[in-house]
Amino acid sequence: MFPLLAILFVLGAVTGSFLNVVIYRLPRKLSLVAPGSQCPRCEQPVKWYDNIPLLSYALLRGQCRHCGQGITMRYPTVELLTAVLWALAGAEFGMTWALLPALLFVSSLVAIFYIDLDHYIIPNVIVLPVAVIGLVANVAISLAGDESAASWQPWYAYLAAGLMSATFFFVVALLKPGGMGMGDVKLAGMMGFFLGKAVLTGLFLGFLFGAVTGVALMATGIKGPKSRIPFGPFLAIGAVIALFFGNDLLDLWTGLFQQ
């Protein structure tokens, strides 16, 4: 198991490095391919040996090699976060087909978290294709899987979860214009296609984290009652927790009501 987790950690860090490009360039409608990485201050291209995930930032002490401009902590944070999530997915799903959609899911959530946090948007180019891939992958895995496995869900559970989650958020968006965007609606649908019934846990936690954070920001005066607070990051956090613990938490909660 350790070799698998180590490999996933390294590949996750590399993926995180690419996600940094996506997070910065995609909302600005810039090419993800060209030009290559460069310092935003001196515009010198970043050499490959200065672009090694996590390691280069530590060796350069968070500064550009040419001009000494500080490099934001966002870059190693995204790389480390993605690496950890990939390793956790490996520990949870092992060498099974379910690992592949899980890796895609957590990677897309990292990008969505930061893009929505920075720009108040959830790009269709991320959420829509990932949602379709997640649904197709989970339906195929469900049809080919072992029905006795604890994580098994019937294929229609993923379809129903996605459609019902998106519909619920769509109704909320209509009832409260401005409080929730269509990006949140699509993200909720994507979560359902990946999580199945565990999406209930993810959505509940998203609302909980969002409410607690909103109250805290208003209580401290950082935000006002009419200030915009992106909801996507809270859904992303809830979705990650639900991926690893969603079914267990759902069983725990339903068990409490049955007692």
Image (spheres, rainbow, N blue to C red):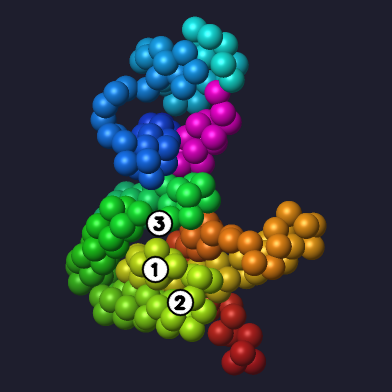
Q: Residue furthest bottom?
A: 258
The residue tagged 2 is 173
Front residue (pair 134, 87): 134
Q: Main secondary structure of the magenta part?
A: helix
Query: Which numbered disc flags the more N-terminal residue, 1 or 3?
Result: 3
Any part of residue 230 in sight: yes
Residue 213 locus on image (x, y percent): 68, 61
Front residue (pair 140, 79): 79
Q: What label does residue 182 carry, if any?
A: 1
Three-letter amino acid code at the position of disc 1: Met
**SS category of the residue bearing label 3:** loop
Residue range highlighted in magenta: 71-83
The residue tagged 3 is 122
Q: Quadrant of the N terminus?
A: top left
Give the residue displayed 48% in from the left and 49% down from the top: 119
**Quadrant of residue 166 in the image?**
bottom left
Query: Which numbered disc flags the more N-terminal residue, 1 or 2?
Result: 2
Give the residue displayed 45% in from the left and 18% down from the top: 39
Residue 240 locus on image (x, y percent): 49, 58
What's the distance in space between the residues labelled 1 and 2, CA to CA?
Answer: 7 Å
**Quadrant of residue 58 in the image?**
top right
**SS category of the residue bearing label 1:** helix
